[in-house]
Amino acid sequence: MMSPIISDLDKLTAHLAARGQRRRVAVVCGTDVDTLKAVADATAGGYAHAIFVGRVAETRQAAEGLMDLSQADFVDAADDTDAARKAVALVRNGEADVLMKGLVGSDVYLRAVLDKTAGLLPLGGVLTHVSVTEWADYGKLLLFSDAAVIPFPTPEQRRAQVGYAVERCRALGVEEPRVALIHCSEKASERFPYTLDYADIIAEGQQGRWGKVRIDGPLDLRTSCDAEALRTKGISSPLEGQADVLIFPNIEAANTFYKTMTFIVGAVSAGVLCGTTRPVVLPSRGDDAATKLYSLAMALL
């Protein structure tokens, strides 16, 4: 039986709270206020238990008044590198369920995640990033990939992006995700070699590679998300202008979309790493507490 469709990010946190299952979150150097507020909200909501790894004294001081520290665990570390390695080990060994980045460099954090012998990425696995944005005028959550990890996806990596995004959609209760393969127009062209592979991805979707799913492309952003634009251009698409997922051609397009939605449109967004053996949260230093909370919620889902 499918879960009820989670159409906005507040419903996501409410769903986790109603589920009543606390997941253990290993937070690497969780000393910044926004990370602490996010973890505090998840703890108060009854769906997270925090394990703060590294900078223990600093974390305790920063958390005063934000959360009940008696509900958290603490693990000492020699430095940030040691903290990242210890947190990854907790997750890898099943002593924590989710890994979350606090105020630590992404290079230090990802080095521990990607360690070939002690990290969280399986041999041959594809590490990618899936974001979700809540755009009020759209009426449902919109997922997109990849704004943070893969610069120029290979055909194999793009297929992995489709698969992970579809999995996220189903976790949100969307039974038949609609996936748009994004380009600046609706025509494939040798000038943009990645568009020539879109037809094969669509065919693989129709053959059941990702289960029940609708995939179409190339489509531009508007024809992916606006039925009127499809009618105006005289285009027929199985997505009907109601995409659940946007697969961008490269990190530049996806990151620009992410920044546009958050900075200019004011939309709320979140994101999670995919491809690892356990969920990994990789927030930006500029993300606010709400973004970090929703990113954690996506991982906990």
Image (cartoon, rainbow, N blue to C red):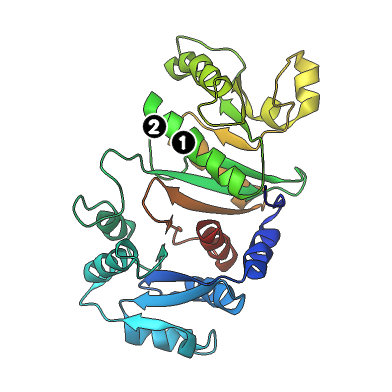
Residue at 62%, 25% in the rendered image: 220
Question: Where's residue 145, x and y in %?
Answer: 50, 39
Q: Quadrant of the C terminus?
A: bottom right
Tag count: 2
Instruction: Give residue 20's quadrant in the image.
Output: bottom right
**Does residue 236 show up?**
yes
What kind of element bears circle 2?
A: helix
Q: Is residue 212 above or below residue 106?
A: above
Q: Residue furthest top?
A: 190
Residue 256 seen in this snapshot: no
Q: Position of residue 137 (x, y in %)?
A: 77, 45
Spatial CA span between label 2 and label 1? 6 Å
Q: Amino acid at mark 1?
A: Gln
What percent of the width, then of the height, locates residue 86? 26, 69
189 w.r.t. 133: above or below? above
Quarter-of-image position of residue 187? top right
Disc 1 secondary structure class: helix
The residue lying at 40 percent from left, 76 percent from top is: 51
The residue that mark 1 highlights is 161
Q: Residue at x 42, y 65 (%)?
A: 97
The residue lying at 73 percent from left, 15 percent from top is 235
Residue denoted by label 2: 157
Residue 40 image position (x, y, % from top left): 54, 78
Q: Is 77 left, or right, of 216 in this rendering?
A: left
Residue extending furthest toward the front? 1
- Nearest the viewer among 56 and 280 is 280
Q: Residues within 10 Å of mark 1 (few under 14, many from 20)?
A: many
**How many neighbours does mark 2 have within 10 angstroms: few (below 14), some (14-19), or many (20 or more)?**
some
For the residues bearing labels 2 and 1, Cβ distance under 8 angstroms:
yes
Amino acid type indicated by mark 2: Gln
